[in-house]
Image (spheres, rainbow, N blue to C red):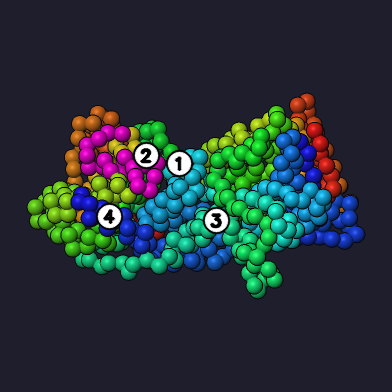
C-alpha cells in the first residue's frame, strides 16, 4: 500500500516561505492499495497537483472519498483535471446532508454553478458517479475495502478505514474527541460520560490495529482550551487514540494554517516529550506535502 | 384503528407544530455562538414534538446508524452538537400546520403532565434501582402520551368528544377514545414510534402503557403517570387515576400511598417542569 500526502494544512491554504517544508495545500491524500486502485481522500487544494501527476495514466478511474463537506476538504474539487477529459471515470463518495437531505452530488452541483465557476457539472467530460454513504456500510473497490466511521465534527464527518491485502490505514478526516457537555457536579454528567465511552469504543473497535493512522492534530493542548467545540483534535488526543487502537504509525496532519514549519516541529517535539513512547506504542510523525509512505 | 385514520396520521404528522416557546428558545439559543450545549439540549428534550421528530430523523434510513438512538443526549454524542443544533433548528422552523385549538386540550397542561411523568419516572427508577439509562426513562415518560398531541391535532373533534365522554362517564380516556375514534392514544403513539424505527423498548412503552404489560421501563412510566395525575401536575385529559395492578404491586411491593411516601417530596419535579413551561 502506498500513501502520499498532497495537502496537509487545515482550514485554508497557507503558501509562503514559512510553510514551504511542510506545505500549504489543504487536505488531500492519495492512497494506492496493492490492487492498484486509485483512492483519493478529500479534495482540498492538494488535489490540483495530484491531478496533474495523473496525466500519464489517463484514462483513469479515481475514487474520491470525502470525509466531510467543509471548504478545506472540497475546495480543490473543481480543479480535478480528470473531470475535463473524456474516458476518465470519477466516483465520488461521502455523506448526505441531514439538514437539506441532499446527497453527496450537491458538492459539485453547488460549486459548479454559473456564479462560482465557468463550467457546469453537466458539461464535465468524465463519467462521474456519486454514492452517498452511511455509517459502517463497507464499499468494495477491487480487492480493497473501505469502511466509513462516524467521527465528531461540527458537520457529519466520516473517517475511512482502508484494507487491502492484509495492509490497512485509517484517516480521521476532522475529528475532536467528544467531550462532556455537563460538569461533574451535574447529575447528568455520569450518564453522558458513559455514552461518550460507548461512542469512543465504537470508533476504536473499527480503527483497531491499522498499520497507519492519519489524524487531525490541529492544536496543542494549550491552544485547544480556547477552541473546544471547533471540531479538531490535539497531538496528545491522537497519540492516546492511536495507542488505544493499537496503531503502528501515527501521522499528524491538518496543520494549523498560521503555524510555521519551525513552530510545527517545535510543538510536535514537545508533544512527543509529553508522551514518551512505551513498548507497543505507535511511532509518531508529522504529515508533510510530498511525503510517501510505502509498505 | 381504521386504515383511513392511520393513513391520515402517517401523512400529516411531519407537519406537527412544535410548541411555540421551544421554537423561540431554540432560535434564541442557536443564534448565540457561545450558547452552552446543555441549555440547548434541555430545550429539545423538554419538547415532546421536537424530541419525537429528532429521534425519528436520527433513527431513519437516511442516517442508517449502526445503533438505535434513544435520547437527545445520545444523538448529541453520535452526531455532534452542531448537527443536532441544526436539526433542531430545521425542526423548529419547518413550515408546520397552525396549532389546532381545542378547549379540551390545553398545551401547557399537557406539557406539564408529560414533563412531570418523565421526571417522576426517572425518580422512580433511581429510587428502586431499576436498570435502564436515565435519559431513556425520561424520554419514555415525555413521549408516552404523544398520541394525544397527534389526535388533538389531526382528529380534533373526535378527540374533544373522547375527553368529554371520559369526563362524563368518569372512565379512563383511552376507553373513550377507543369507542369514539376507534383507536386510543397509546396505539397511535406506538404506531408512529414503530413506523419511525424508534428504539423497541420505547415503542413498547408508548404502545403498552394502558395494556397491562409489565416491563421495567413501562412500569416506571405507569407509576409516574398515575402519580402525575394524583398530584394534579398538569392535566392528562383522563379523569381516572388507575390503581396499581398486580404486576406493579409485585415489582415495587407497595401501593400508591406507599409509593408517594417512598418517593418523598415531589414538589421540585413539579416546580422544575413549571419553571420550564413558563420560562
Image spot of residue B223 (x, y percent): 27, 41
**Is disc 2 surrounded by few (<14), some (14 to 19) or many (20+) residues within 10 Å?**
some
* Residue at horizontal 54 percent and vertical 45 percent from the top: A134
| First along the sequence among labels 4 and 1 | 4
Which residues make up the magenta segment? B194-215
Say if labels 2 and 1 share a chain. yes
Q: Which residue is mark 4?
A: B7
Gap in angstroms between the C-alphas marked 2 and 3: 29 Å
Image spot of residue B264 (x, y percent): 32, 42
* Residue at horizontal 22 percent and vertical 42 percent from the top: B210
**Is disc 1 surrounded by few (<14), some (14 to 19) or many (20+) residues within 10 Å?**
some
Query: Please, which residue is most extreme toward the top here?
Result: A279
* Residue at horizontal 56 percent and vertical 60 percent from the top: B35
Q: Which residue is mark 1?
A: B68
Q: How many marks?
A: 4
| First along the sequence among labels 2 and 1 | 1
- Numbered disc 1: secondary structure: loop
Foreground residue, A148 or A151? A148
Gap in angstroms between the C-alphas marked 4 and 3: 28 Å
**Is disc 3 surrounded by few (<14), some (14 to 19) or many (20+) residues within 10 Å?**
some
Query: Please, which residue is most extreme toward the front here?
Result: A87
Query: Please, which residue is most extreme toward the left here?
Result: B169
Q: Are marks 4 and 1 in contact (CB under 8 Å)?
A: no
Q: Which residue is mark 2?
A: B200
Gap in angstroms between the C-alphas marked 3 and 1: 22 Å
Asked whether, in this view, residue B10 is left or right of residue A8, the answer is left
Q: Are marks 2 and 3 in contact (CB under 8 Å)?
A: no
The mark lying in front, picked from 4 and 1, is 4
Question: Which numbered circle lies on residue A103?
Answer: 3
Q: Tell which subunit mark 1 falls on.
A: B
Q: Are marks 4 and 3 in contact (CB under 8 Å)?
A: no
Amino acid at each position: 500500500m502506498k500513501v502520499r500526502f498532497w495537502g496537509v494544512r487545515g482550514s485554508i491554504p497557507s503558501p509562503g516561505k514559512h510553510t514551504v517544508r511542510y506545505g500549504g495545500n489543504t487536505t488531500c491524500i492519495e492512497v494506492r492499495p496493492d490492487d492498484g486502485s486509485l483512492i483519493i481522500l478529500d479534495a482540498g487544494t492538494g488535489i490540483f497537483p495530484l491531478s496533474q501527476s495523473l496525466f500519464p495514466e489517463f484514462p483513469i478511474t479515481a475514487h474520491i472519498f470525502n470525509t466531510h463537506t467543509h471548504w478545506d476538504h472540497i475546495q480543490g474539487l473543481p480543479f480535478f483535471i480528470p473531470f475535463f477529459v473524456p474516458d476518465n471515470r470519477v466516483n465520488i463518495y461521502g455523506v448526505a446532508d441531514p439538514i437539506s437531505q441532499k446527497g453527496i452530488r450537491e458538492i459539485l452541483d453547488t460549486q459548479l454553478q454559473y456564479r462560482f465557476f465557468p463550467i457546469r457539472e453537466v458539461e464535465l467530460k468524465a463519467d462521474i458517479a456519486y454514492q452517498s454513504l452511511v455509517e459502517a456500510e463497507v464499499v468494495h473497490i477491487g480487492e480493497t475495502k473501505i469502511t466509513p466511521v462516524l467521527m465528531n465534527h461540527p458537520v457529519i464527518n466520516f473517517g475511512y478505514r482502508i484494507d487491502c491485502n492484509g495492509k490497512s490505514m485509517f484517516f480521521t478526516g476532522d475529528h475532536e474527541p467528544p467531550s462532556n457537555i455537563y460538569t461533574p457536579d451535574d447529575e447528568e454528567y455520569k450518564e453522558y460520560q458513559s455514552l461518550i465511552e460507548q461512542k469512543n469504543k465504537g470508533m476504536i473497535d473499527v480503527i483497531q490495529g491499522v498499520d497507519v493512522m492519519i489524524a487531525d492534530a490541529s492544536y496543542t493542548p494549550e491552544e485547544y482550551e480556547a477552541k473546544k467545540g471547533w471540531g479538531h483534535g490535539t497531538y496528545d488526543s491522537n497519540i492516546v487514540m492511536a495507542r488505544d487502537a493499537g496503531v503502528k504509525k501515527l501521522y499528524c496532519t491538518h496543520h494549523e494554517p498560521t503555524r510555521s514549519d519551525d513552530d510545527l516541529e517545535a510543538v510536535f517535539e514537545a508533544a512527543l516529550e509529553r508522551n514518551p513512547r512505551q513498548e507497543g506504542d505507535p511511532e509518531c510523525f508529522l504529515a508533510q506535502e510530498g511525503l510517501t509512505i510505502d509498505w | 384503528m381504521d386504515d383511513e385514520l392511520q393513513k391520515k396520521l402517517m401523512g400529516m404528522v411531519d407537519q406537527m407544530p412544535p410548541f411555540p416557546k421551544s421554537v423561540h428558545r431554540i432560535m434564541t439559543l442557536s443564534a448565540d455562538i457561545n450558547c452552552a450545549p446543555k441549555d440547548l439540549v434541555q430545550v429539545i428534550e423538554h419538547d415532546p414534538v421536537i424530541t419525537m421528530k429528532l429521534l425519528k430523523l436520527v433513527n431513519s434510513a437516511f442516517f442508517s446508524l449502526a445503533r438505535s438512538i434513544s435520547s437527545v443526549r445520545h444523538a448529541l454524542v453520535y452526531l455532534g452538537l452542531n448537527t443536532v443544533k441544526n436539526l433542531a433548528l430545521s425542526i423548529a422552523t419547518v413550515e408546520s400546520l397552525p396549532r389546532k385549538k381545542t378547549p379540551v386540550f390545553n398545551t401547557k397542561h399537557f406539557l406539564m403532565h408529560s414533563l412531570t411523568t418523565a421526571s417522576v419516572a426517572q425518580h422512580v427508577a433511581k429510587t428502586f434501582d431499576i436498570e435502564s439509562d436515565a435519559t431513556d426513562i425520561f424520554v419514555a415518560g415525555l413521549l408516552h402520551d404523544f398520541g394525544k398531541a397527534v389526535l388533538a391535532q389531526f382528529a380534533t373533534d373526535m378527540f374533544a368528544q373522547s375527553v368529554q365522554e371520559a369526563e362524563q362517564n368518569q372512565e379512563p380516556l383511552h376507553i373513550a377514545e377507543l369507542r369514539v375514534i376507534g383507536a386510543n392514544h397509546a396505539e397511535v403513539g406506538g404506531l408512529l414510534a414503530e413506523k419511525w424505527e424508534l428504539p423497541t423498548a420505547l415503542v413498547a412503552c408508548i404502545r403498552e402503557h394502558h395494556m397491562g404489560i409489565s416491563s421495567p421501563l413501562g412500569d416506571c412510566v405507569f407509576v409516574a403517570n398515575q402519580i402525575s395525575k394524583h398530584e394534579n401536575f398538569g392535566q392528562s385529559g383522563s379523569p381516572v387515576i388507575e390503581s396499581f395492578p398486580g404486576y406493579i404491586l409485585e415489582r415495587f411491593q407497595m401501593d400508591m400511598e406507599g409509593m408517594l411516601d417512598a418517593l418523598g417530596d415531589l414538589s421540585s419535579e413539579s416546580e422544575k417542569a413549571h419553571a420550564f413551561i413558563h420560562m
